[in-house]
Amino acid sequence: MVTLKEVINHPQTKAFMEVANANLGAIGYTEHGIRHAELVAMRTGHILKSLGFNKKMRDMGEVAGYLHDIGNAINRHDHGQDGAFLVYHILKDLKADYKDIAQVVAAVGNHDEEKGEPVNSISAAVIIADKSDVHRSRVRTMKEIDFDIHDRVNYAVKESHVKIDKKRKKITMELVIDTRISKVMEYFEIFMSRMVVSQKAAKLLGCEFKLVINKTKLL
């Protein structure tokens, strides 16, 4: 399997990642650039490592995590499937093994909660890593905080962590939310579908999914 460094340095990756983030900025979405890509890659690798997967699986997970949103360079709608198409060509150009490519494109193509499902261990880890990145640093402008619930909820989140308990088979997302900015119920209002797919992903990995907000267990 090719390394994450090779993928990051591929000219197509750089060009399409930049355009993907710019496209979402133009239509009012939160940050989906290098910061988000690096964090999802890191958390995907952490999840797989903590659950005992080998280095090759972790490498594939990090690549899938980094590239999962690249399809936004084409269109927000169906960006998972568009991204899988782009990732296939990047990995093929880097001469990755076709069996490895198949697992990575499946993870990219299934990461979005609207149309995707956890279909393998890599996709499950990417889903949880992606959905866990709720944080004020993703908000592009303060102008819409009072009007846009997504910006308000993201800005209210001061801390976001994913903790793995291999022995008890639990994956826990822990958030610290400033309730003066956004109530906890607003989080569930917009992110319930993400929590459902995260539960499915954890189950595929042989674990339970837990959600803790401000030290209170909610799932």
Image (tube, rainbow, N blue to C red):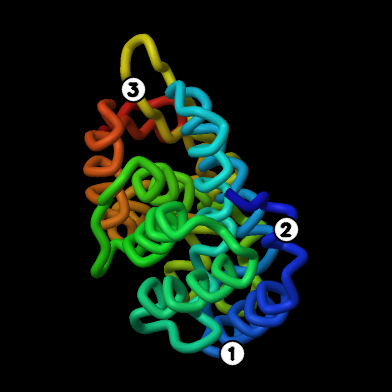
Residue contact at pointers 3 and 2, CB within 8 angstroms? no
The amino acid on which the numbered mark 1 sits, given as a three-letter code, is Ala
Residue 170: mark in rendering: 3
The amino acid on which the numbered mark 3 sits, given as a three-letter code, is Lys
Please name which of the two marks, 3 or 2, marks the residue nearer to the observer: 2
Give the residue number, with chain letter if any, for mark 1. 26
Q: Residues within 10 Å of mark 1 (few under 14, many from 20)?
A: few
Local SS, label 2 = helix
Q: Earlier in the sequence, mark 3 or mark 1?
A: 1
Along the line of sight, the residue nearer the viewer: 5 or 215: 5
Residue 204 in view (yes/no): yes
Query: What is the quadrant of residue 78 in the picture?
Result: bottom left
Q: Residues within 10 Å of mark 3 (few under 14, many from 20)?
A: some
The amino acid on which the numbered mark 2 sits, given as a three-letter code, is Glu
Local SS, label 3 = strand
In percent of the image, x 40 and y 54: which residue is there? Answer: 99
Q: Is residue 110 above or below residue 184?
A: below
In percent of the image, x 63 and y 80: which residue is there? Answer: 16
In percent of the image, x 71 and y 81: which residue is there? Answer: 15
Task: Please provide percent x and percent y for residue 73.
Answer: 55, 84
Give the residue number, with chain letter if any, for mark 2. 6
Along the line of sight, the residue nearer the viewer: 219 or 58: 58
Real-space Cα separation, disc 1 to disc 2, in angstroms: 29 Å
Q: Is residue 53 above or below residue 87?
A: above
Q: Is residue 86 above or below residue 36?
A: below
Task: Please provide percent x and percent y for residue 3.
Answer: 67, 50
Real-space Cα separation, disc 3 to disc 1, in angstroms: 38 Å
Please name which of the two marks, 3 or 1, marks the residue nearer to the observer: 3
Please name which of the two marks, 1 or 2, marks the residue nearer to the observer: 2
Real-space Cα separation, disc 3 to disc 2, in angstroms: 32 Å
Q: Is residue 140 above or below residue 45?
A: below
